[in-house]
């Protein structure tokens, strides 16, 4: 911690030096421009805009880094950075220069505020993307009372507090009722981002209480934005009128119903189409931004604020099955790097803490903080007790819900922009948001440390942690290339079984051969689709029966590619696939070497490979895995062997097949002292057995002493229906996986699923 603090101080010193340098240059430029009758600080409005942008980025990101090293939310550092650049510090110490850097001219101010307003929409979209509705559905019943009381109690407190505010704090005293509704909503909302950050940091995300806390925050956040949207509808009419209010509520309800039914499918289809069809760089990001902008525009048309459309768009985008991790990371990067520091910095600039020097305003601010904290804690605590929680658990829930964070700042900024809040009242709310957010993490950490884990919960958490370490569980999208041979149809069936476990999207490309001449050009490979869908459904049904939670249907894109070449595979691989499934007839020769077309396909894909090979006899019927069938998995302690075992369990689970794990000991005497490799293999063996128990898959282990692992594997394979084997790709122009794997490919009597590593994967 001391080292982190020293680093933080050095970074803060760098920020101060930068500010002093910028200030001296700006002061000189200001004097020169004023003496020459210039147009501004740097001679142009664009120059001032760039300087404002740079200052907000440097100060915001610098203080955000410092706060993060002190175990506080980085966004609070960005907000406080804006406060320091505003009239609170910079304007107090050097008012002339502060006004020169951040002038009040509407045209100049509008340039940086446009970036901040776009930042609001992007932040709301990102918040929606982080809204895990699956988690809410799983534990929604448990957090219903927490969300209800957690909204009602602070809402009533904030609404009542508004009637004690002096008229000087309200921009329009005749709209006190509207201001009360807005203030009540602002006090009842929680920051999902801050809550989830602390819960994840304390390793509570998988625990029952952690999931209830995050789900409650999600529900409160969603309801809060709906109330905010209706409130802005009231503001547009100037007062509370029954018929316009009912019209606004009906319009919001219709928008939500459309969004989560027809709109959901439209969003999924657009993202999927852009990812699969468009060739230009970052095309999916552009489509996502268009979706967000369109939905924000629609909410503006129906008379509510654009933030509701951006938030709902984020929820739909986050649920899209095509939204892979790398696409989300690209989107998150630009929002975090640019728009967040600018928006929170501008929010801080609008807050003038010098007004709190007035004892009356300081007392009102302290009362607002106390009412917000007590109201939120009491509401969540009472809801937790009503849900049957213990005193310690309800206390933890109350502490967690008290973080306002970025959500409160966004709400307050919107209220200021539509003239519901005055500058002074905005400053009071921002002060309350900073105080409650900075106090929440240590309070929640203290509360969570007092909660021991029950044996049942410990077992479930360990089981879920084991799931997340699995290879199949981390897959997001499959690319499947098959032909019309028996091996191709078998590969499509296996890919469906793997994809059906989690409803992951699959793209099926059909290699055009002489066997497929009867299918019209551009037609769909119907038999492969039927095989894949049937296998996916059986896999999903098995998971649903074991877990008790529904699995989404596999999103399948099936088409013919004429021909499937290195270039076409490379084009597809850039769309975010984790695994390439290949099943082609005649893919191996008599010596185990691979056919040129298989080498060409593999050369275009940089990720992990799964090659479905026919075994010793290419023309034999492929096996149908069923109850009692055996899948053989050789292991050798490497990562690819672990992946192969995970894949074998995923294939065995829906068919109630058995898995036999073969461990070939190279030492001739079992009594010899085990090597480090032997210990690693035995640890892997234990983990595979635990994972098999988790999936309720019967597993047997076998240890064989043999000088040739390839011969031992082929001998054991005669008693199995399928061999699933991990192998490491070796450097070279053609596929080569080492002598053991190539020996098995050449001599194994049964079909083989060869799970191959990415190029360059370390396996030791």
Image (cartoon, grey):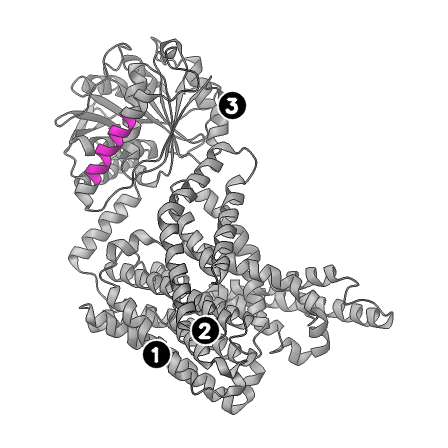
The answer for how far apart the CA atoms under marks 3 and 2 are is 53 Å
Question: Element type at marker 2?
Answer: helix
Residue 387 as seen in the image, left or right of residue 173: left
- Of circles 1 and 3, which is in front? 1
Can residue 539 be seen here? The reply is: yes
Residue closer to the observer: 645 or 8: 645
Which mark sits nearer the N-terminus, 2 or 1?
A: 1
Q: Residue at point 22% right, 62% down? A: 142
Which quarter of the image is occupied by the N terminus?
bottom left
Which contiguous range is marked in magenta?
531-543
**Residue sitting at 35 percent across and 61 percent down?**
218
Which badge, 3 or 2, is on the more N-terminal residue? Answer: 2
Residue 72 locus on image (x, y percent) = 44, 67
**Label 2 to label 1, Cα distance in Å?**
18 Å
Task: Please indicate whether residue 722 sits to the left or right of residue 254 in the image.
Answer: left
Give the residue furthest to the left.
628
Provide the residue designation for mark 2: 433
In the picture provided, is 42 more to the left or to the right than 734? right
The residue pinned by badge 3 equals 567
Left or right: 613, with 48 as reference point: left
Contact? badges 1 and 3 (CB < 8 Å): no
Examine the rendered structure and indicate whether residue 448 appears above or below residue 613: below
Q: Residue 185, relative to residue 172: is it above or below?
A: above
Residue at (70% x, 69% y) in the render: 101
Mark 1 Cα shell of 10 Å, populated few (<14), some (14-19), many (≥20): some
Kindly identify which numbered label has been placed on residue 156: 1
Instruction: Identify which residue, 751 or 79, lies in the foreground.
Output: 79
Give percent across and percent down for residue 397: 29, 69
């Amino acid at each position: 911690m001391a080292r982190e603090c020293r680093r933080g101080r050095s970074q803060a010193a760098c920020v101060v030096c930068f500010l002093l340098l910028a200030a001296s240059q700006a002061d000189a430029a200001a004097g020169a421009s004023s003496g020459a009758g210039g147009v501004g600080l740097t001679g142009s409005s664009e120059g001032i805009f760039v300087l404002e942008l740079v200052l907000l980025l440097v100060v915001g990101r610098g203080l955000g880094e410092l706060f993060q090293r002190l175990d506080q939310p980085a966004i609070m550092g960005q907000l406080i950075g804006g406060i320091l650049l505003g009239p609170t510090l910079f304007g107090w110490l050097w008012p002339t220069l502060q006004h020169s850097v951040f002038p009040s001219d509407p045209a100049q101010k509008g340039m940086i505020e446009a970036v901040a307003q776009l930042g609001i929409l992007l932040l709301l979209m990102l918040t929606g993307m982080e809204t895990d509705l699956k988690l809410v559905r799983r534990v929604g019943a448990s957090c219903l009372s927490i969300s209800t009381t957690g909204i009602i109690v602070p809402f009533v407190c904030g609404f009542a507090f508004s009637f004690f505010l002096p008229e000087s704090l309200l921009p329009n005293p005749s709209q006190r009722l509207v201001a009360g509704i807005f203030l009540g909503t602002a006090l009842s909302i929680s920051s999902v981002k801050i809550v989830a950050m602390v819960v994840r940091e304390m390793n509570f995300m998988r625990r029952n209480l952690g999931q209830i806390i995050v789900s409650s925050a999600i529900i409160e956040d969603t309801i809060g934005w709906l109330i905010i949207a209706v409130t802005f509808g009231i503001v547009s009419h100037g007062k509370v009128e029954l018929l316009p209010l009912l019209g606004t509520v009906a319009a919001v309800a219709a928008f939500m119903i459309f969004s989560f039914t027809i709109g959901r499918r439209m969003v999924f289809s657009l993202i999927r189409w852009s990812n699969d069809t468009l060739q230009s760089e970052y095309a999916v990001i552009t489509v996502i931004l268009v979706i967000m902008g369109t939905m924000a525009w629609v909410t503006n048309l129906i008379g509510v604020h654009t933030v509701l459309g951006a938030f709902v768009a984020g929820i739909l985008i986050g649920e899209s099955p095509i939204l892979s991790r790398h696409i989300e990371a690209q989107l998150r990067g630009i929002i975090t790097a640019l728009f967040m520091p600018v928006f929170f910095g501008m929010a801080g600039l609008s807050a003038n803490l010098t007004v709190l020097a007035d004892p009356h305003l300081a007392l009102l601010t302290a009362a607002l903080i106390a009412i917000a904290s007590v109201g939120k804690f009491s509401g969540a605590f009472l809801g937790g007790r009503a849900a049957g929680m213990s005193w310690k658990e309800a206390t933890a829930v109350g502490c967690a819900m008290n973080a306002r964070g970025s959500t409160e700042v966004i709400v307050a900024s919107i209220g200021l922009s539509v003239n519901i809040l005055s500058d002074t009242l905005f400053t009071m709310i921002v002060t309350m948001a900073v105080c409650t957010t900075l106090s929440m993490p240590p309070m929640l950490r203290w509360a969570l440390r007092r909660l021991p884990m029950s044996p049942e919960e410990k077992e479930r958490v360990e089981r879920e942690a084991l799931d997340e370490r699995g290879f199949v569980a981390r897959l997001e999208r499959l690319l499947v290339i098959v032909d019309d041979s028996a091996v191709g149809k078998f590969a499509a069936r296996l890919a469906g079984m793997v994809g059906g476990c989690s409803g992951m999207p699959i793209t099926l490309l059909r290699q055009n051969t002489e066997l497929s001449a009867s299918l019209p050009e551009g037609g769909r490979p119907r038999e492969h689709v039927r095989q894949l869908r049937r296998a996916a459904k059986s896999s999903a049904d098995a998971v649903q029966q074991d877990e008790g939670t529904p699995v989404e249907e596999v999103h399948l894109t099936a088409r013919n590619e004429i021909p499937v070449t290195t270039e076409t595979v490379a084009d597809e691989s850039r769309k975010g696939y984790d695994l390439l499934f290949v099943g082609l007839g005649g893919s191996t020769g008599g010596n185990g070497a691979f056919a040129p077309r298989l080498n060409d396909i593999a050369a275009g894909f940089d990720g992990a490979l799964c090659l479905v090979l026919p075994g010793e006899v290419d023309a034999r019927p492929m096996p149908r895995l069923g109850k009692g069938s055996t899948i053989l998995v050789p292991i050798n302690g490497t990562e690819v062997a672990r992946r192969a075992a995970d894949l074998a369990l995923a294939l065995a689970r829906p068919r109630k097949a058995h898995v036999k794990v073969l461990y070939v000991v190279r030492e001739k005497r079992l009594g010899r002292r085990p090597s480090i490799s032997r210990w690693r293999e035995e640890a892997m063996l234990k983990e595979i057995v635990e994972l098999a128990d988790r999936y309720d898959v019967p597993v047997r282990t076998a240890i064989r002493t043999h000088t040739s692992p390839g011969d031992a594997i082929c001998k054991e394979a005669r008693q199995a229906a399928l061999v699933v084997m991990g192998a490491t790709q070796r450097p070279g122009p053609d596929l080569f996986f080492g002598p053991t794997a190539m020996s098995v490919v050449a001599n194994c009597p049964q079909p083989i699923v060869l799970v191959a590593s990415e190029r360059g994967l370390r396996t030791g």
